[in-house]
Image (tube, rainbow, N blue to C red):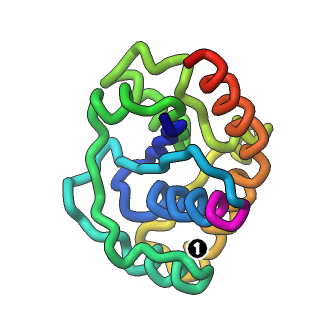
Amino acid sequence: MPFRVLFVCTGNTCRSPLAEAIARGFVEREGEGGFEFSSAGIQAREGGLASPGALEIARENGLDLEGFQSRSLTADRIDEADLVLVMEPGHRSGVLGLSPAADTKTRLLGALAGREGSEASVADPLGGNVDSYRRTFAKIEALFREGIPRILEMAAGDADHS
């Protein structure tokens, strides 16, 4: 069974879709199998499109969000995940409000990467210019790269307990 990682933000149109695309691109490039990535938003509406800024930045970086459709966060989606990575502390509260049992598997992406305080959060670029989306992309990519060793350890530990 794949190790399932769920990325969570507010509207599921900017940060979490970019994180999902970055993660997929990474495992494809690195040949890491056994992962399944998805995303959802605590205030998302089902079937929305990625924001124009997210689409542009994804294209600039060789990633594809053209067919992306937003998903609202549900208890079932949380429960299906092995790891839930949120973009800011308030998202963790949203996850635990739907599924209190997810406490041990829900982490701030930046904290997983060893960052603290404001450096652990990823600001929402929605409504900003293309440079704000570039900064957001760069931060998510850096946090994912710094956090991937921990994700691989968790996946290996999960496989050991299957």
Question: Is residue 117 positioned above or below 62 on the image?
Answer: above
Q: Nearer the viewer, residue 10 or 17?
A: 17
Question: Is residue 89 positioned above or below 131 on the image?
Answer: above
Secondary structure type for disc 1: helix
Q: Position of residue 157 (x, y in %)?
A: 68, 23
Name which residue lies at 68% across and 61% down: 141
- From the viewer's perspective, tell me whether residue 106 is left or right of residue 102: right
Magenta highlight: main SS: helix
Q: Which residue is mark 1?
A: 132
Highlighted range, magenta: 26-30
Residue type pointed to by label 1: Ser
Question: Is residue 82 positioned above or below 61 on the image?
Answer: above
Q: Position of residue 40 (x, y in %)?
A: 36, 48
Q: Quarter of the image containing the C terminus?
A: top right
Callout 1: few (<14), some (14-19), or many (20+) C-alpha neighbours within 10 Å? Answer: some
Name which residue lies at 64% across and 58% down: 27
- From the viewer's perspective, tell me whether residue 139 is left or right of residue 15: right
Which quarter of the figure has residue 63?
bottom right
Q: Nearer the viewer, residue 76 or 111?
A: 76
Specify whether residue 107 is painted magenta: no
Name which residue lies at 69% across and 67% down: 29
- From the viewer's perspective, tell me whether residue 24 is left or right of residue 140: left
Q: Position of residue 139 (x, y in %)?
A: 69, 60
Name which residue lies at 36% across and 78% down: 66
Question: Is residue 115 positioned above or below 12 on the image?
Answer: above
- From the viewer's perspective, tell me whether residue 112 is left or right of residue 1: right
Q: Position of residue 129 (x, y in %)?
A: 51, 81
